């Protein structure tokens, strides 16, 4: 029992910094995209920043990820404070609304690639230099590996087409205006729907399958690069 608790606590210390960074990048990307397309609302509120304090939502950024780590061993989902967007300020409103939504998940995919490159670089350098970092070696590899997986998870989770998740805003771009308005109006029930779905084993298995289907090429690419260099 104590060992399980200690393991979970170590996982929290390992994964919570990754979650804070990843969600900060995600929300800052939304804020920057909105600013780029003409809406300064988030910029004026200081949301174009990687400082997690500007983005933290107590439940979505702290409590839910910690519960996920303690119950499943991994923080599969999490969210930060939504970035406020005044759509009436956006140039080419419908397209911009879609691009602002896409910016978050895309930023997580970019961050996952950066974690992958860092993992490859660290592995190659420690092998070539013969450096022995002891237990720190395993910690760093685990940290970078979890950075890849967590960011893929966040990208996939946020592209679920249930309002208010980003995927719903992307889908709305392809719908007639009146249909899109009704669809996005589901937002008031969105998180309740999501909480129900993630507790359905079949839904969880489907999301996990998508995450690992995306992750597999990362692992193969890392292995290929490392083998070609060493």
Image (tube, rainbow, N blue to C red):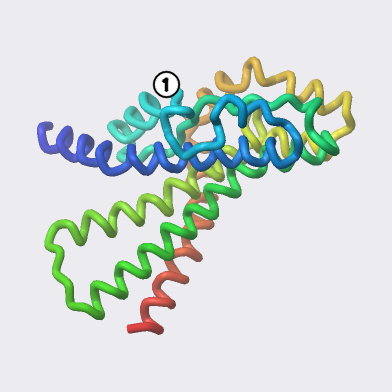
Where does residue 137 sit, x and y in percent of width and height? 20, 61
**In the image, residue 171 lies at what x, y percent?**
75, 38
Q: Is residue 12 left or right of residue 31?
A: left
Residue at coordinates 80% horizontally, 21% vertically from top-left? 182
Between 79 and 126, the one lying in front of the other is 126
Along the line of sight, the residue nearer the viewer: 8 or 147? 147
Instruction: Give the total of numbered labels.
Output: 1
Left/right placement of residue 162 relative to residue 153 reads: right
Which residue is found at the position 46% from the left and 59% from the top? 114
Report the quarter where the C terminus lies.
bottom left
The N terminus - image quarter: top left
Q: Which residue is mark 1?
A: 59
Depth order, front residue of 31/43: 43
- At 68% across and 30% down in the image, what residue appears? 40
SS assignment at label 1: helix
Across and down, in percent, residue 190 comes to 62, 22
Relative height, residue 57 to residue 158 (above, below): above
Q: Does 203 sit above or below residue 186?
A: below
Determine whether 188 is above or below 11 in the image: above
């Amino acid at each position: 029992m104590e060992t399980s608790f200690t393991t979970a606590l170590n996982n929290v210390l390992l994964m919570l910094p990754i979650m804070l960074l990843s969600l900060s990048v995600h929300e800052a990307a939304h804020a920057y995209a909105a600013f780029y397309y003409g809406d300064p609302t988030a910029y004026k509120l200081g949301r174009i920043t990687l400082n997690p304090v500007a983005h933290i939502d107590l439940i979505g950024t702290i409590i839910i990820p910690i519960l996920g780590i303690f119950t499943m061993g991994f923080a599969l989902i999490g969210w930060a404070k939504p970035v406020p967007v005044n759509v009436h300020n956006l140039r080419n409103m419908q397209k911009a609304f879609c691009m602002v939504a896409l910016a978050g998940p895309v930023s997580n995919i970019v961050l996952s690639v950066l974690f992958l490159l860092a993992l490859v670089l660290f592995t190659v350098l420690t092998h070539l230099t013969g450096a022995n970092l002891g237990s720190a070696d395993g910690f760093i590899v685990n940290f970078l590996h979890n950075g890849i997986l967590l960011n893929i998870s966040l990208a996939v989770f946020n592209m679920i087409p249930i309002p208010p998740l980003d995927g719903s805003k992307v889908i709305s771009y392809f719908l007639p205006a009146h249909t899109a308005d009704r669809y996005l109006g589901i937002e008031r029930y969105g998180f309740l729907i999501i909480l129900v779905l993630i507790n359905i084993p079949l839904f969880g298995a489907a999301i996990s399958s998508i995450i690992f289907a995306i992750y597999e090429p990362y692992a193969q690419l890392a292995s290929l690069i490392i083998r070609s260099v060493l």
